[in-house]
């Protein structure tokens, strides 16, 4: 933020930067790429097979419910991973909600403990700024979520691996500071061709490591769970998507356009997205698989289920969701709470 403000008030700095070599604007590789390598398979020396055909055009949007529990979300996410993999998508991105203690929102609470995923007493929460422990607390919730996704995804190959579940290995070496909330889970199955690599909360600085793993993996699955860059663009992100000198400058200053282009070149696709925020005072959920449109749901007033309010081919904006609620006659939550509007 300080860099952007300085450029706004110091146009001469921008002029000097543009006159200089554009090579300064190219994202440099991460300093530490000494993470654990992938095991070799007999297929690694050959070119990966052509991507399988996409699924049929059948729209599954109407049959994709919003999960209300951690177990439901993991089942839904791992199923999307498996379906996408069988469709030839071996480079996947997922955005999920995270398990959180139901008492996390208690006012005046000085310390928020980590959620225990082995209990049913959990809530699913968006990975936003309300988490008291910041990015490391998010990591402590995201890492076990990623582990559960991998366990259920790899379970489909258990018979082929002699009924033996794969070994799970966590690698934090790419998080040089130890506090950036980045990690890598890798499965080691009986058959190395079934190994999976899953990055937890990768940042733009992690892209060189992702490229290295993806190039080693061949046809094996490489996944990114809850990347730290936002799903929507600000002005700097939009500018960084341009293949111009200004675009290179925007990428150098933190715009994600160059990083996303490098991931696109590797073939990464969004296969499962479950997001949430507040609209009209109530919880909204956005959900999408790789083979569906976006579904928009509003939480009922008893907080037991979600009611579908609309769909969208492109990711709906806040204003789109607000209009969907209006079209359904859903008013502000406080008005419903005090009896000025019908309950949802």
Image: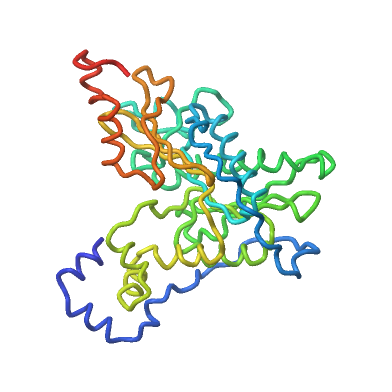
Above or below, 253 relative to 128: below
Where is residue 56, by image quadrant? top right
How far across and down, in percent of the image, does residue 332 sit?
23, 26
Which residue lies at the image location 50% right of the left edge and 72% below the top edge? 29
Frontmost residue, 100 versus 233: 233
Q: Residue furthest top?
A: 339
Q: Where is residue 220 in the image (x, y as percent from the top left)?
A: 68, 56
The answer to whether residue 25 is above or below residue 265 is below
| Res. 254 image quadrant | bottom left
Q: Residue at image x 51%, y 70%? A: 31
Quadrant of res 229: bottom left
Q: Which residue is drawn at 69% across and 49% down?
A: 187
Q: Quarter of the image for the N terminus: give it.
A: bottom left
Which residue: 50% across, 42% down?
292
State whether residue 205 is above or below residue 183.
below
Q: Where is residue 334 in the image (x, y as percent from the top left)?
A: 22, 22
- In the image: residue 197, left or right of residue 19: right
């Amino acid at each position: 933020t300080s860099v952007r403000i300085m450029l706004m008030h110091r146009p001469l700095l921008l002029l000097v930067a543009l006159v200089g070599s554009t090579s300064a604007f190219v994202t440099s590789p991460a300093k530490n790429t000494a993470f654990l390598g992938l095991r070799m398979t007999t297929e690694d020396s050959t070119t990966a097979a052509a991507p399988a055909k996409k699924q049929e055009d059948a729209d599954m949007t109407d049959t994709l419910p919003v999960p209300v529990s951690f177990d439901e979300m993991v089942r839904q996410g791992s199923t999307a991973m498996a379906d996408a993999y069988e469709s030839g998508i071996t480079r996947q991105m997922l955005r999920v909600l995270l398990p959180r203690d139901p008492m996390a929102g208690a006012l005046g609470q000085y310390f928020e403990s980590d959620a225990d995923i082995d209990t049913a007493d959990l809530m699913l929460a968006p990975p936003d700024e309300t988490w008291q422990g910041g990015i490391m607390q998010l990591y402590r919730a995201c890492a076990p979520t990623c582990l559960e996704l991998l366990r259920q995804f790899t379970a489909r190959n258990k018979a082929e691996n002699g009924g033996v579940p794969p070994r799970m290995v966590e690698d934090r070496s790419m998080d040089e500071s130890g506090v950036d909330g980045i990690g890598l889970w890798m499965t080691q199955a009986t058959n190395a061709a079934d190994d999976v690599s899953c990055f937890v909360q990768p940042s733009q600085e992690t892209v060189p490591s992702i490229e290295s793993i993806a190039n080693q993996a061949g046809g094996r699955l490489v996944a990114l769970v809850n990347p730290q860059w936002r799903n929507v663009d600000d002005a700097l992100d939009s500018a960084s998507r341009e293949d111009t000198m200004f675009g290179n400058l925007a990428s150098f200053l933190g715009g994600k356009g160059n990083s996303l282009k490098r991931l696109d070149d590797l073939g990464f696709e969004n296969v499962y997205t479950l997001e949430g925020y507040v609209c009209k005072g109530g919880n909204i959920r956005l959900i999408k698989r790789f083979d569906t449109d976006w579904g928009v749901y509003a939480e009922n007033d008893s907080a037991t289920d979600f009611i579908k309010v609309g769909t969208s081919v492109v990711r709906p904006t806040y204003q789109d969701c607000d209009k969907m609620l209006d079209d359904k006659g859903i008013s502000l939550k406080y008005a419903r709470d005090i009896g000025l509007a019908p309950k949802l």
